[in-house]
Amino acid sequence: MLSPLLIVLLTLLMLYRSALYAWIWLWLLPRGRDVLFVYSESPIWHDYMVNQVLPLVSKRAWVLNWSQRSRWRRFSIAVRLFNAFGGSRKFNPMVIVFRPFSWARKFRFFLPFKGWKHGNKAPVEQLREELVSFLEHGVQVERPADQYPML
């Protein structure tokens, strides 16, 4: 009995995401907006994200501060993109890069920062370098399977 309802809901979700991608590719990317930057006031990553990552994308990004989410405009494009592509776990801090006619590329900094607070800064720096490479060349770096998940 729930199967038809589930199929309808999944179809509607797919149509919504497809419409968002079409809007991104045809309307937003030509206007120079191709990045969603999500961070928070966490003492662990705030300074790094604001000083080392945000300058890479600031001119082309929507910026969402998770700590101020009560002030977000519910139907803004940034919030819609976050809700559709951010996921419900390990989304903060994160950078999502949109490219024409390809899936959104997510750079999730949450797991790398878990090591950061214990003195292991290499995963955060590596992910930042991957972001820089992707922004400059559209190149996705292959990572060993045993490293933290990206998507």
Image (spheres, helix red, strand yellow):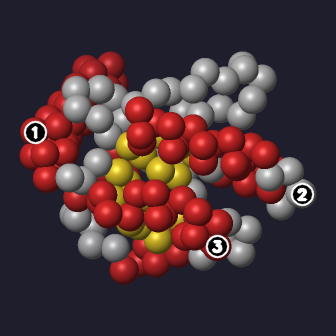
User: Label 3 amino acid?
Assistant: Asp
Disc 1, SS: helix
Q: Under tag 3, what secondary structure? A: helix
Q: What's the CA distance linking mark 1 and mark 2?
A: 43 Å
Q: Secondary structure at mark 2?
A: loop
* Mark 1–mark 3 CB contact (< 8 Å): no
Say left or right for 39 vs 135: right
Q: Position of residue 69 (x, y in %)?
A: 43, 73
Q: Earlier in the sequence, mark 2 or mark 3?
A: 3
140 or 133: nearer the viewer: 133
Q: Residue furthest front?
A: 136
The residue carrying mark 2 is 118
For label 1, the residue is 26
Q: Which mark is residue 47?
A: 3
Residue at 22% from the left image edge and 64% from the top image edge: 76
Residue 104: quarter of image: top left
Q: Residues within 10 Å of mark 3 (few under 14, many from 20)?
A: few
